[in-house]
Image (spheres, grey):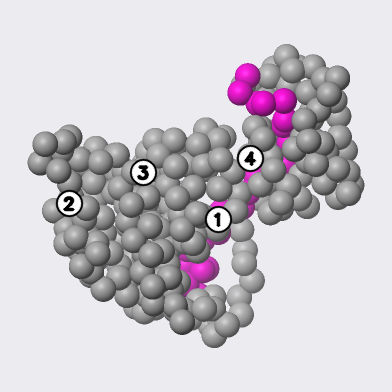
Amino acid sequence: MRPQNPRRVSPAVWITGFHSVKETLGSRAEDVLELWVAAVKNQDLETQEIIRQARRRGIPVHFRDRDEIARVTKTDRHQGLAARAKEKSVLSFSDFLSRWEENEDFKRDHFFLVALDQIQDPHNLGAIARSASVFGAHGLIICDRRSASASLGALRSSAGALEKIALYEAGNLGQALASAKKAGFWIYGAAAGGRPAWQSALNSPMILVIGSEGEGLRKSTEEFCDELVGIPISESGVPSLNASVAAGILLYEVYRRDKRDSP
């Protein structure tokens, strides 16, 4: 089996906010270099637990003025917590497929990934990552061009979910989907005029592709989809759903189906 080689060696970054710091400590504490905590007289119980967890892991804990934390992290939305950590590695999707084909230990039943087709708003990326994590997706596929990256803004919007879910990068989404189909994946694209999701088979292993905020899926992406799935909406309402909202509804349908079909 080929090793999981990161796409790049990641520099250290500041991760701020309670949920993001908590998830980072929980999922990859070995990458955390230090923890900064706002110096206050009485720390709340959840912050005390984060401090204890960091110390058990041998991570230096420093108490700093809130303004100093804001100055160093370049945000005043730090909630009194900041962790300096190695940036999360993004793996090559082609490496993942090689491992998928070579490793029989993967659980292929109910295995699904979410691919993002030119999602450019970091907040949408974060919200989709949060829904993907909540509803059991096994990873996110992000293109390296014209797409949002796993930035601090996306991390905040995901409430730390980007620290829990695997990230895969594809240079060309069409090529990635074509390779995935050869490896046995079913490809479903989210589209306003698609078949109602609850009428689709949603076979697994599968990749659910979410299109951009304004234009949806590109035609070149639709060509690789086995089926387009949609969400019927009221004629009296607005004409479309936000990309992250649509993703959340479709991901719930995948999760509901998996739970229904599980023994």
- Give the alpha-carbon distance from disc 3 to disc 4, as whole Å: 19 Å
Give the residues in magenta. Answer: 76-98
Q: Residues within 10 Å of mark 4 (few under 14, many from 20)?
A: many
- Residue assigned mark 1: 165
| Residue drawn 11% across the image and 36% down it | 236
Q: Are marks 4 and 1 in contact (CB under 8 Å)?
A: no
Q: Residues within 10 Å of mark 2 (few under 14, many from 20)?
A: few
- Marked residue nearer the N-terminal end (1 or 2): 1
Q: Is residue 18 left or right of residue 175?
A: right
- Residue assigned mark 3: 244
Residue 20: assigned label = 4
| Residue drawn 32% across the image and 56% down it | 250
| Amino acid type, callout 2 | Pro
- Give the alpha-carbon distance from disc 4 to disc 1, as whole Å: 13 Å
| Residue drawn 26% across the image and 73% down it | 201
Disc 2 element = loop
- Marked residue nearer the N-terminal end (2 or 4): 4
Q: Position of residue 152 (x, y in %)?
A: 57, 35
Disc 4 element = helix
- Give the alpha-carbon distance from disc 3 to disc 1, as whole Å: 16 Å
Q: Residue furthest bottom?
A: 104
- Marked residue nearer the N-terminal end (3 or 1): 1
Residue 195 on the magenta span: no
